[in-house]
Image (spheres, helix red, strand yellow):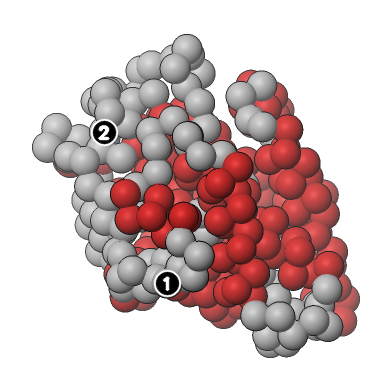
Amino acid sequence: MYGAFIGDIVGSKYEFNNIKTKDFPLFSPGCDYTDDSIMTAAVAQAILLRQQEPENHRDFSGLLVEVMQDFGRRYPHPTGAYGGRFADWLRRENPAPYGSYGNGSAMRVSPCALAAVTLEEARELARGSAAVTHDHPEGINGAEAVAAALFLAKTGASKEEIRQYVAEHFYSLDFTLDSIRADYHFDVSCQGSVPQAIVAFLESADFEDAVRGAVSIGGDCDTTGAMAGSIAWTYYTVEAGGTEAWVQGRIPPAMEEIRAQADSLLPQEFIHIASAFHQLCRRRWEDWQSSSACAPILSPCP
């Protein structure tokens, strides 16, 4: 989750004032959290609430809608604003999905991969979290791609394994950031931003470099930053200390310093949700590893 928060905050300043370079202050006046962070926190909170009552047969999609609308109404004016159709969805009494293939489905999906105990569950949760608003096949595809990449990173897959999986199941990644930077433009579709975010992660040397790379191509760079950051945060944590480092919450010192800077810009509610959510993910993972059983989110664990 923190990778998404940080990528969002770093990119927020440049969303409507693109900077075509990786050389810029990571945090500077004008950086703030946007709807990307708000809805990421909302998805995490919905999963937390669902896990607090695992025997309750309440529909997860309905719970997610309630929580997303609650967060949207309590944080009504984020930096960069909500998209028009999503803002209307937040206000509706009985909101329905509206056929979007925008990257709003992928920007908020990281909690689904973090909570999941199998790749199949990560993709299933991603589909469910996307479909309440972005029920176009491309909207769902983008959410699944980010969730799959993040889950693979969590379980120790190499960058080449992640690249191959995404290329086989979702998108061609046959380009480099340098090859698209000059001509890349503002594109909020999943198909026009998710592959770019994944390549920013794949080309990176470390977490910070992944975020810088995502922001450097321009476009909807708070969201590409959030998507690339979410994958990179987990990947570089695991690279430094194995999956156990992710389970224990041990992150490299350089990333800890970046997180401390982000905390000064995030609502305390989001920080508390992130902490509680990590504990939930840890419990689910340890339960699954020890007994191949855990409390269901959408359905009984596979």
Residue 12 position, x and y percent, is 41, 29
On screen, residue 211 versus residue 47, left or right, reads left
Above or below for 21 versus 299: above
Above or below for 11 versus 225: above
Above or below for 141 versus 183: below
Q: Residue at x 72, y 45 (%)?
A: 274
Q: CA distance from mark 1 to mark 2?
A: 31 Å
Which quadrant: the C terminus?
Answer: bottom right
Q: Amino acid at mark 2?
A: Gly
Which secondary structure lies at badge 1?
loop
On screen, residue 57 versus residue 211, left or right, reads right
Q: Residue furthest front?
A: 93
Above or below for 78 versus 294: above
Viewer-proximal residue among 243 and 138: 138
Residue 17 appears in the rendering: yes
**Where is mark 2, residue-wise?**
218
Q: Amino acid at mark 1?
A: Ala
Residue 35 position, x and y percent, is 47, 42
Residue 298 position, x and y percent, is 65, 80
- Residue 96 numbered mark, or none: 1
